Amino acid sequence: MSRIQLPRRRFLALSAAGLGGALLAGCDRLSETSEVQEVLSSAESLTYRVQRLLGGRDALAREFTEADLSPVFKVNGSSMPEGEDYAALLEGNFVDWRLRVEGLVANPLDLSLEDLRKLPQRTQITRHDCVEGWSAIGKWRGVPLAIVLQRASLLPTARFVVFHCADVYERALDGTGQYYESIDLIDAFHPQTILAHSLNDAPLSVGHGAPLRLRVERQLGYKHAKYVMRIELTDRLDRFGRGKGGFWPDRGYEWYAGI
Ligand SMILES: Nc1nc2c(c(=O)[nH]1)N[C@H]1C(S)=C(S)[C@@H](COP(=O)(O)O)O[C@H]1N2
Ligand SMILES: [Mo]
């Protein structure tokens, strides 16, 4: 958590110093301090810090009513993972599917869909916003990620949760292309962050990420990993894909896609 505290102090220091005056002075005064350079170095980290400051760590995404449900919820990105493994799981109605929770945990887990359904559940009607410019309101049901993480018992070094998916979105020459995503522990323990197994009162369709997908309601659509097969707790993101923490972040999108 100290990672959050430090940038907050730095951001406040920046505001107090008077950004406007410094800009009038041609930025010279600003660029002299390395702390300021660090804050300004990335618009993304600024967004992340500002959202944490203004939105509060626990602010909830808006929830809607049944009357607001979109008649059609678009399928976007992968619509069917390729390969025999997924096909076999689908064929067996995901009875043999297991969610593996591993990495920096004291108690690795292997959970069936049945196991997940027996845990406390949450239902939420939320709006999904895709960067491509469409939105849809859907009713999601699943187990809060916090419950699963508590059972796995995080080691003190765990800082991020990585979601490994079944689909290869696009096979690249550098060997990357498998879809994955990651979030920090603040979003991981947020009450609306759930591992969803149903949409609009029906088991997830293949298009929407069967048998399990992430809902992380304070962020954009691409963070909501579909076809989650494995959850890995880690202290660093540079070991995965191209090192930016997700398939789309690896291709230039922000890692923290707050809305
Ligand atoms: N595994 C996986 N997860 C994914 C994607 C994908 O291609 N593969 N696409 C993302 C994007 S860009 C969006 S908008 C949503 C789409 O979810 P939907 O198909 O249920 O609408 O899933 C996200 N999660
Ligand atoms: Mo998206």
Image (tube, rainbow, N blue to C red):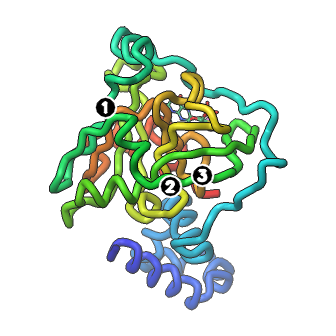
Q: Can you tell me whether the CB of the residue at mark 3 lies under 8 Å from the nearest atom of ligand 1?
A: no
Q: What residue is pinned by disc 1?
A: 98
Q: Where's residue 65, x and y in %?
A: 77, 54
> Relative to the observer, which residue lies in front, 170 or 181?
181
Nearest to N terminus: mark 2 or mark 1: 1
Few, some or many residues within 10 Å of mark 3 (<14, 14–19, 20+): some
Residue shown at the point (67%, 45%) measured from the top left:
139
Residue extending furthest toward the right: 67
**Which numbered marker is on residue 208?**
none
Residue 180 seen in this snapshot? yes
Label 3: element kind? strand
Residue 50 seen in this snapshot? no
Residue shown at the point (38%, 79%) measured from the top left:
6
CA gap between label 1 and label 3 equals: 22 Å
Quadrant into which the N terminus falls: bottom left
Q: Are marks 2 and 3 in contact (CB under 8 Å)?
A: no
- Is 211 above or below relative to 253? above
Residue shown at the point (79%, 39%) measured from the top left:
70
Q: What residue is pinned by disc 3?
A: 123
- Is 84 above or below relative to 220? above
Q: What residue is pinned by disc 2?
A: 193
Q: Where's residue 194, x and y in %?
A: 49, 51
